[in-house]
Image: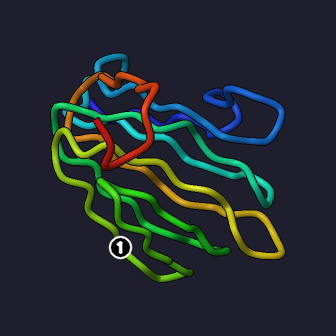
Amino acid sequence: MTTVTDREQLRQNTDGTALFVGADHGAGVSFFWVDTPPGGGPETHWHPYTETWVVLQGEAVIESDGEELRAGAGAIVTVHPRAHHRFRSSGTGNLEMICIHASPKIIQEFVTTAPGTT
């Protein structure tokens, strides 16, 4: 069976981010389709699986296990399992990217300490 789902059906908040939970669609992956203004992004968290980001437009500053990286349109970023990470939209316009979770459901735990600290 093949299905088509409209992004608007998956929007989670007023800034436009959509959530696709693979288990709800018979898919083995899940993803966030992020669309957030400068300064937007999640707090520090981790997943028990790999997460892959595809930056479609804008720029992100990424903090992962004590490192800070930058990624712009066209970049593909891989975050390894259990890495404490977060990103912030850092450009002048919205950051749009797909955050692919190697799981049919999103599993994430938010942490209260900064990446790289104990």
Q: Which residue is drawn at 77% across and 64% down?
A: 94
Q: Which residue is drawn at 29% across and 41% down?
A: 101
Amino acid found under the numbered disc labelled 1: Ile
Q: Which residue is denoted by mark 1 in the rendering?
A: 76
Q: Which of 66 and 45 is in front in this view?
A: 66
Q: Which image quarter: residue 103?
A: top left
Residue 44, relative to residue 35: is it above or below? above
Q: Which of 103 and 60 is in front in this view?
A: 60
Q: Nearer the viewer, residue 24 or 56?
A: 56
What colour scheme governs how the chains and residues are painted in the rendered image of this protein? rainbow
What x and y, as percent, mark residue 39?
75, 55
Residue 28, relative to residue 114: is it above or below? above
Q: Which of 100 and 112 is in front in this view?
A: 112
User: Position of 23 compared to 112: left or right?
Assistant: left
State which quarter of the image contains the C terminus.
top left
What secondary structure is marked by label 1? strand
Q: Residue at x 25, y 31 (%)?
A: 27
What x and y, as percent, mark residue 24?
36, 17
Q: Which residue is drawn at 63% across and 46% down?
A: 41
User: Position of 16 compared to 108: left or right?
Assistant: right
